[in-house]
Amino acid sequence: MKLCRFGENRYGVVRDGQVYDVTEHVAKAVVAAPLQRGDAAIANLAAIVRLVEGAKIGTPVGAANTTKFLAPVINPTKIVCAPVNYEAHITESEADPGITFNHAVARIDKAGLFLKASSALVGPSEGVAVRFSDRRTDHEIELGVVIGRECRNVSEKDALDVVAGYAIALDMTVRGTEDRSFRKSIDSYAVLGPWLVTPDELREPDSVDFSLKVNGEVRQQSNTRHLIFKTRKLIAWASNWYTLYPGDIIMTGTPEGVSPVAPGDVMDCEMQYIGSMRVDVRAAAVYTSDSHASEVLVG
Ligand code: MN
């Protein structure tokens, strides 16, 4: 099943290029279950699938290629990311001080994983808002793994049992000397979409072709078979350090071809078994380090 969130926070299922509204099924499944840490819809995905498959799907509310998709997860407790997880990306990083800022590139077993703030998360229709126009913001396309169950100390053998599904992820990055979590947690710098594909439609995460184009030109093109630490190992490793909760996202790492984007650019992302999404790049509101135009958002 392809579960999406679209428009003004509606849930949908995508079938044969059409979007069907299943918000009522999601609400029913969520209300029937106790509250728990993490994303409510993802925590109750099995119940949602049963409700959707047991009902008439109704009439589509739109074509997938004209629907504005939000991230299929609202409330991950964390976004866990793998750095330096493709050999050819390590090679290009070592050759480009604009990526490394002359810091030595550690291997992933030494670098560990890092966390991205969940507040950075957006869907493809929301686009990426580039902050700090005097700094370099790069695209990093990655296979995104969405965790379906609270778990810890998961073995590699059992790792795929805790997966709710997969989506295309963009680990947008400001290059610089600061910690990764600081540079990669800016609002809109975590894109997930266009929907979540359940594992019955993507059975082997170690063999997925994907590509990213900027303004029609291919920049990144690889396959997850080139991952240094494969998906099962990343799930096992992350869950050995942190309890994982429903909706938590693992961004598995990016291959070679990272490059800067600027306002006005268009990123076209494609991933085998999942689909494609277009993400527009715009400029964020302009802030300086000493400006305090507070935006206090309250209901
Ligand atoms: Mn990355």
Image (cartoon, grey):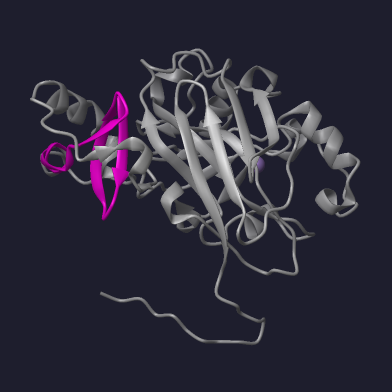
Q: Quadrant of the N terminus?
A: top left
Q: Is residue 11 magenta?
A: yes
Residue 167 pos. (x, y %) = 45, 33
Image vertical order of residue 51 relative to residue 127, above or below: above
Image vertical order of residue 157 relative to residue 137, above or below: above
**Residue stretch rendered in magenta on the structure:** 1-28
Residue drawn at x 81%, y 34% is 90
Image vertical order of residue 69 relative to residue 128, above or below: above
Q: Is residue 277 magenta?
A: no
Quadrant for ligand 1 reads top right
Residue 274 shows in this picture? yes
Relative side of 42 to 268, left or right: left
Residue 84 pos. (x, y %) = 74, 36
Relative side of 143 to 134, left or right: left
Residue drawn at x 13%, y 33% is 59
Q: Quadrant of the C terminus?
A: bottom left
Work out whether residue 158 or residue 169 is closer to the camera in this orientation and state it.
169
Residue drawn at x 58%, y 17% is 206
Residue 113 shows in this picture? no
Count numbered badges in the picture. 0
Residue drawn at x 51%, y 48% is 279
Residue 16 pos. (x, y %) = 30, 23
Work out whether residue 183 or residue 132 is closer to the camera in this orientation and state it.
132
Residue 34 pos. (x, y %) = 17, 42
Work out whether residue 175 or residue 249 is closer to the camera in this orientation and state it.
175
